[in-house]
Amino acid sequence: MATYEDIKKANDEARVTLIKVGNKTNGYVEVNERIKAFRKVYPEGFILTEMVSNQDGVCVFRSEVGYYIADIKVVLGTGTAYENEGSTFINKTSFIENCETSSVGRALGMAGFGIDDDVASADEINGTIAQSEADKAKNQQKALNDLRAMYEKNGGLTWNKYLAEIAPEGMTNEIYGKEMARLKKEITDKAEKEKK
């Protein structure tokens, strides 16, 4: 699975086109550059498009981007776009193609490709990742405290019992092993002191 840093690196390598809107110049990563960035991170990922409708000169497309784990489809982003035939110079002849490309660009943007650092959703993603890491650490600490209590109560604890009863997601054999070794030493030291 790709990390935020993988996506950021691919985005950093993407060519940015400067677009002036009023008095402000904005950077924009074109869809072809977003696709390249996506393919760098997910070389075997998918970009699926579907024409939702095409009636009375109005076209609507929906796109999904993601990857497969075994036979499981993991969708990273979706995008929807509509275009009116003849509404712009390009849409006079290619409004269907333009609509599909726009929906792909939106899906890739929702997946983190082609957005720059000051887009609010990128900040929200960073905040979510930080909160997720904090929650994971908190859950692991609670599990270690529960592990200690169970160990002291039962005089020992097997890995299977631990997994079945209190292991949080992300608790590894390494963390468990280190904590068990520490607890055994602490209890042994305590017993030694009580003998004296």
Image (tube, helix red, strand yellow):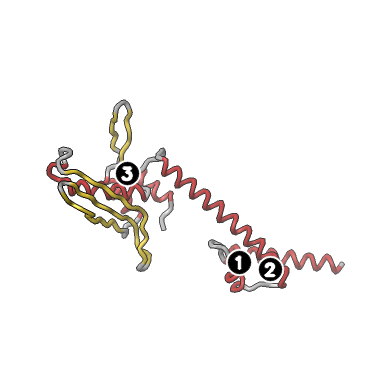
**Chain-order first, disc 1 or disc 3:** 3
Q: Residues within 10 Å of mark 1 (few under 14, many from 20)?
A: some
Q: Is residue 19 left or right of residue 92?
A: right
Q: Nearer the viewer, mark 1 or mark 3?
A: 1
Mark 1 near mark 2, Cβ–Cβ under 8 Å?
A: yes
Q: Residue 44's spot in the image, x, y percent?
A: 31, 60
In the rendering, which numbered label is found on residue 166? 1
| Amino acid type at mark 3 | Ala
Q: Choose between 92 and 117: the one closer to the eye.
A: 92
For the point 45% across and 45% down, the residue is 124
| Rendered view: 57 above or below 21 | below
**Chain-order first, disc 1 or disc 2:** 2
Q: Residue reaching furthest left?
A: 93
In the rendering, which numbered label is found on residue 150? 2
Place residue 16 in its image quadrant.
Answer: top left
For the point 62% across and 62% down, the residue is 143
- Quarter of the image where the N terminus is located: bottom left
Helix, strand or loop at mark 3: loop
Q: Residue reaching furthest right?
A: 196
Helix, strand or loop at mark 1: loop
Q: Residue 153's spot in the image, x, y percent?
A: 72, 70
- Quarter of the image where the C terminus is located: bottom right
| Amino acid type at mark 2 | Met
